[in-house]
Every structure is written in structure tokens, then in C-alpha cells.
Amino acid sequence: MALTVIQLFYYGWFFRRVAFFKPKEKIQSRQHPVSVIICARDEDENLARNLPGVLVQQYSSSSEVVVVNDNSLDDSKYILQELKKTFKSLNVVELTQEAKLISGKKYPLSIGIREAKHEVLLLTDADCVPASEHWIHKMQEGYDNGIEIVLGYGAYHRRKGLLNKLIRFETFHTALQYLSYALAGIPYMGVGRNLSYKKDLFLRNKGFSSINHIPSGDDDLFINKVATKENTAVVIDPDAITRSVPRTTWSGWLRQKSRHYTTAKFYKLRHKFLLGLYFASQFLFYPVLAAAAVFYDWRFVLPVFGLRLLLQAIVLYKSMKKMGEEDLWPWFVFLDMWMFFYYLIFAPALWRRPRRSWN
């Protein structure tokens, strides 16, 4: 019963905020000059495939696209040179030396931020493409008086197969949490595939200096450090989504997710408590439900499960529809059960030492 109450609390207090999200109406709409920043290392194919989608954005105010080519050994340099002939808004920064004492993507990203001409920064990755030509416009609309951070949704392309559904559900599930927490006034992370913040915020907090020793965390740990109830907003709109190609092998996905989870141990204590309580309740829910049905009284168990299922179905349906993942909804019970095994697989990553490379 206690596990169900905890689950009902998270769905009723946090996750419903995404499901029933409506952007605030603005008296006056303003378009801010925007610098899009992309870091790339040996990403020639992704740059050729995805960068034009960033460069052809329909945006009436000033914008630029800063691509930091980080010591690439492939044909990235030549692809960027060709694109620059057509798109004058493209600013290419060539890095030819490594930062010895700074792990991961933080050094090239810091260089890109310092090279940016505009105050509003919009971050994405080389393997991402905006879902529409209005991505920049939609994301910058999140800014208002006092707002310095705008969180967006970085999704994956829809493909056939079970692995694709599992990857996309886990990504959606993560976004459901960090977006709903932010809407509840407790922002704790963002994802670098679709994230915006102001240049002054970055410089004022001395960039990534406090987390330079950690390979990952240029997105979630930085936001965990600087985000507050007052300075953070979210944008939930089908036109404001970015999509990237998901892993196609189980081993590749396992490596990717294991690397991502190595940063969670550095979150603030209250964030770790809220996330840990939810994970524990979700992990234990189905085993305890099965045990109660067998050893207690299934007539008591069934209404409890039904209440959670009803609330979950409503919240997930509305949230998935808003985030372009509605095809996952018929599978949500199976995908929710799968999370038990997901936690078993990835829990050890929380204590594993992170690797030092970022790509």
C-alpha cells in the first residue's frame, strides 16, 4: 500500500504538470538573438546529415550557429567549410589541441560559449536534428523576466524493434521527471541535446570549473548547480523537440546509459532523495504487488493496482502526446514493468568511476 501511495504522489503531484502543461500567455512576445552551439568530434556524417536542419531555421531575429570542431580526424573540417559557403550564419571554431586537465566535452563547449556573439545560448549535439524549422523560435519563447535557463526535450527517432521502444521510453521517462520537477519549482537537470541558458549565467558561475574533473555533467551537473525555482522555465512543444539516432545494439546502449548515470551521485541531496524514493517505489512495486496477490488477498490488491494504472494511463497518454511519443502509449504497462529490469542493469553505474572521454 505504501508503495502505491508513493507512486500516486509522484504521478499526481509531479508528472501531471507535464501532462496538463500549458505555456503562460505573454502580453508581449520578444525574439532574442540566439547563438546555437554544437560540439563535434569525428562527426562528419552527422554534421552532413543534421547541421543543415539547424542552419535553415525560420527565425526573424539574429541567430548564429557555432560549431566547435574538437580535434576531429575525419572529414568534419571539409564538410564545415562547404556548409559555410552557403550559410553565412555558421561560425566554425577549430580546436587542434586537447585540454589536459579538463575531462569530457566541457573544454570545447566552454570555447564555443565564449565565442558566441549573443546572450541566449541554445545547445544541441551533432547527432541531433530539430523536429521543425521553428525550434529556435519555440525554445527562446521560454525566456521571460528573471528566466536564465530553458529546458527542452531531446528525443530519439522512431524505428522498428523492441530496443527502439525501450530507449525512447526511458528517454521520455527521464524527461517526464526533469521537466515536471522544474515545473514544480525543483529543477535538477537538463540534457545537452536540447538545452538553453544565458551566457552571463555561465560566466557568472565560472563555467564548468567546479565539475571539470568529471567527464560528463556539462549539462545535468551544471544545471543542478545553477538552476533555481525562479530562473528556470520549460518548453514542451512538438516543434521544440530535437531528435537523434538511437543506438541499434544492446551493448552500445548499455555503454551509453552507464556513462550517463555516473553523474547522478553528484546531484544535490534533496534531488537524490526525491529521485531515489521514486526509483525505489517503482523498482519494488511489481514484485511486492505479485507477492501480495499470492500471499495476501488479490481482491485487495486489484483495486490498488487499478487506481495506479488509471492515473498512470491518463498522465502518460497526455504527456506522450505532448512530447511526440504517443505510439508508446499502448505499450506503457509492459514498458513500466521493464523498468524493474532496467534498474537492475544500471544501478551499478551509480557507483562506477566514469570514463574520461566524451565521444
Image (tube, rainbow, N blue to C red):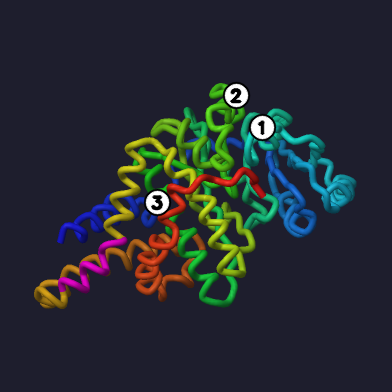
Q: Name the residue under label 3.
A: 177
- The percent position of residue 91, horizontal first and vertical second, equals 80, 38
Q: Does the magenta segment cover residue 36?
A: no
Q: Residue at x 32, y 38 (%)?
A: 270
| Residue 306 visible, this orientation | no
Q: How many marks?
A: 3
Check disc 3 and report its element: helix, strand or loop.
Answer: helix
Q: Which residue is drawn at 41% across and 75% down?
A: 330
Q: Which amino acid does label 2 sit on?
A: Leu
Magenta: main secondary structure: helix
Residue numbers of the magenta segment: 283-292
Q: Name the residue under label 1.
A: 110
Q: Residue at x 63, y 59 (%)?
A: 244
Q: Name the residue under label 2.
A: 203
Side (left or right) of 4 relative to 243: left
- The percent position of residue 241, horizontal first and vertical second, equals 57, 54
Q: How far separated are the C-alphas under marks 2 and 1?
A: 10 Å
Check disc 2 and report its element: helix, strand or loop.
Answer: helix
Q: How far separated are the C-alphas under marks 3 and 1?
A: 27 Å
Side (left or right) of 298 relative to 196: left
Check disc 1 and report its element: helix, strand or loop.
Answer: helix
Q: How far separated are the C-alphas under marks 2 and 3?
A: 28 Å
Q: Nearer the viewer, residue 16 or 79?
A: 79
Disc nearest the viewer among 2 and 1: 1
Q: Which amino acid does label 1 sit on?
A: Ser
Disc nearest the viewer among 3 and 1: 1
